[in-house]
Image (spheres, helix red, strand yellow):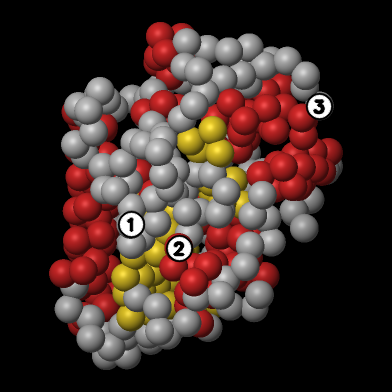
């Protein structure tokens, strides 16, 4: 297949690009700064020569959007919103204008759409959409608005020949440098991987290889459209999540952090405490109902696999490609 990845230069894009190329597919990445073969320039806002890559493709997987790992200033929040909405809109325009449109458009979304809650998991049918929870910072609602508008832009696109799926993804755990798992493992190795603000908040996650398998599953399943949760079936409280990761890493100690300590750490790392404190209890209702099975559905085995792969990658001589 010919697969187009708008915004495919980030962590998740790298995971998909390697896997899909390794499976023999032709992968074209749309990026503002093309630097490698198979990359095409686009600005994420306007139509241009890049639409030729979409016309005649089999699949478009739009991953474009400003990273959420930043300080949540008004400027950055607006950039997060605009980059996601604009890219979804212009991808829809390109598909609508194509002489031979792709058969499926997978649009990245986020599990952050769901409410901060502890009482029950969120699936696509019974999940509670966030934005009005009591006792949480008001600006958390903006993250939910981003997700709503992101998905709405795909829904509005007039693409009758192209099936549309919104990927409500949890955090994708891969051993790649700079990704969320790399950051968590770094904290553990420093002895700082303890509970944050008590650690009762749930962490939803998905192993990178299950993420790829889920994407391939959704490409092949012509009967599935709309929003789909991409998350392992067993989210768990942050204190348990980090305890398991410490065990996989062989680190017996993980210092706890209070809410104000988390705020200081997020400020130093130029990130935001929402990523640490929001309870994301998300489960893959539609995927499992459709028959998808997870190879790494439980965190202990997933964490052990990721730590082992990270160690192997770090031990490779420089210049050698990952297996």
Q: Position of residue 20 (x, y in %)?
A: 59, 70
Marked residue nearer the N-terminal end (2 or 3): 3
Q: Position of residue 214 (x, y in %)?
A: 54, 67
Q: In this view, does 65 lie to the left or right of 257?
A: left
Marked residue nearer the N-terminal end (1 or 2): 1
Task: Report which residue position mark 1 lands on.
Answer: 126
Q: How far apart are marks 3 and 1 (CA)?
A: 38 Å
Nearer the observer, 54 or 203 = 203
Q: Residue farthest to the front?
A: 119
In front of the other: label 2 or label 3?
2
User: Is residue 52 among what the camera can see?
Assistant: no
Task: Report which residue position mark 2 lands on.
Answer: 285
Task: Report which residue position mark 3 lands on.
Answer: 250
Q: How crowded is mark 3: few (under 14 residues within 10 Å), some or many (20 or more)?
A: few
Marked residue nearer the N-terminal end (3 or 1): 1
From this view, report whether residue 143 is shown above or below residue 234. Answer: above
């Amino acid at each position: 297949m010919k697969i187009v990845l708008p915004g495919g230069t980030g962590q998740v894009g790298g995971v998909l690009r390697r896997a899909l190329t390794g499976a023999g597919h032709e992968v074209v990445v749309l990026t503002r700064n093309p630097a490698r073969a198979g990359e095409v320039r686009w600005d994420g806002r306007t139509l241009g020569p890049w639409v030729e890559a979409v016309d005649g493709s089999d699949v478009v997987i739009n991953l474009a959007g400003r990273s959420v790992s930043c300080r949540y200033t008004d400027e950055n929040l607006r950039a997060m919103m605009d980059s996601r909405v604009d890219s979804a809109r212009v991808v829809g325009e390109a598909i609508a204008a194509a002489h031979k449109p792709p058969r499926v458009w997978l649009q990245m979304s986020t599990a952050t759409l769901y409410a901060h809650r502890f009482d029950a998991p969120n699936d696509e049918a019974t999940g509670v959409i966030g934005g009005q929870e009591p006792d949480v910072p008001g600006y958390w609602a903006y993250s939910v608005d981003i997700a709503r508008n992101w998905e709405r832009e795909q829904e509005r696109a007039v693409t009758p020949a192209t099936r549309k799926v919104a990927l409500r993804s949890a955090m994708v755990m891969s051993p790649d440098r700079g990704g969320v798992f790399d950051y968590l493992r770094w904290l553990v190795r420093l002895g700082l991987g303890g509970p944050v603000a008590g650690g009762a908040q749930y962490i939803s996650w998905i192993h990178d290889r299950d993420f790829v398998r889920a994407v391939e599953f959704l490409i092949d399943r012509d009967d599935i459209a709309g929003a789909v949760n991409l998350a392992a079936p067993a989210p768990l409280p942050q204190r348990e999540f980090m305890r398991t990761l410490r065990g996989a890493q062989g680190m017996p100690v993980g210092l706890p952090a209070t809410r104000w300590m988390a705020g200081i750490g997020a400020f130093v790392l130029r990130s935001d405490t929402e990523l640490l404190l929001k309870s994301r209890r998300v489960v893959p209702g539609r995927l499992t109902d459709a028959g998808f099975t997870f190879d790494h559905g439980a965190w202990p085995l997933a964490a052990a696999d990721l730590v082992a792969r990270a160690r192997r990658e770090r031990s490779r001589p420089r210049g050698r490609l990952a297996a």
